[in-house]
Image (tube, helix red, strand yellow):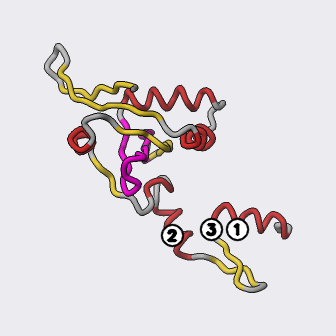
Amino acid sequence: MRTTSQLVDFIETTNILFKKGEEIMFNFKAAALKSTTLSELMNDRIKVSTDDIIRDYPSGITIEQFDSVTAGDKQYYIATIKEDAQVYINCGTVLSKVFDAFVAGFDGDVTGASAELKNAGGIKVKLSKTRTHGGNTITTVTVL
């Protein structure tokens, strides 16, 4: 059983419960969104491809927030960009290494690292495509 104080904290942080007058009500929509989304950063946003980012933002993007996502046995990061609040991107190997470093600096706290990145104004990066010596196409990341 939760205390009134714990319930208020739960209501404010999850949006699954809300107060209607003196009654505490269950927010079915919020619960459904939470259970069907890998990350809250994906809610009400459209996934865009790396090719879209390279084409639409040739001078780079500002990554504002990020989150770690696990789907099955695969873990990866997603990120939002300051230039368009309606989109998110799936991050590849290089950006994942950047986010791993950020998270390590926050003792493993993904949420804390992401919040501080947003508070700091984000990080500007430029994505581009290049070919390896073996002929494979890879995405490179330049921190601006």
| Label 2 element class | helix
Q: Give SS at disc 3.
A: loop
Residue pointed to by mark 3: 15
Above/below status of 115 relative to 141: below
Q: Which residues are magenta?
A: 71-91
Locate residue 91, reporting x and y percent: 37, 38
Where is residue 23? Give x, y as percent.
Answer: 75, 84
Placement of 122 over or under 139, stated as above or below: below
Residue 41's place in the image compared with 113, above or below, is below
Mark 3 to mark 2 CA distance (whole Å):
11 Å
Does the CB distance between marks 3 and 1 fall below 8 Å? Answer: yes
Image position of 123 (left or right of 54): right
Q: Amino acid at mark 2?
A: Ala
Q: Amino acid at mark 1?
A: Ile
Q: CA distance from mark 3 to mark 1?
A: 5 Å
- State the residue at coordinates (47%, 53%): 41
Quarter placement of the C terminus = top left
Q: Is residue 48 left or right of residue 103?
A: left
Quadrant of the rendered image containing residue 77: top left
Q: Where residue 88 sits in the image (x, y, percent)?
A: 38, 50
What is the distance, in whole Å, between disc 2 and disc 1 at their CAs? 16 Å
Identify which residue, 12 or 56, lies in the foreground: 56
Marked residue nearer the N-terminal end (3 or 2): 3
Which residue appears at 62% of the width and 33% of the height? 108
**In this rendering, the label closer to the viewer, 2 or 1:** 1
Q: Position of residue 61 (x, y in %)?
A: 36, 39
| Residue identified by numbered label 2 | 32
Name the foreground residue: 131 vs 73: 131
Q: For the residue marked with disc 3, what is the amino acid?
A: Asn
Where is mark 1, residue-wise? Answer: 11
**Residue drawn at 29 percent across, 26 percent down:** 140
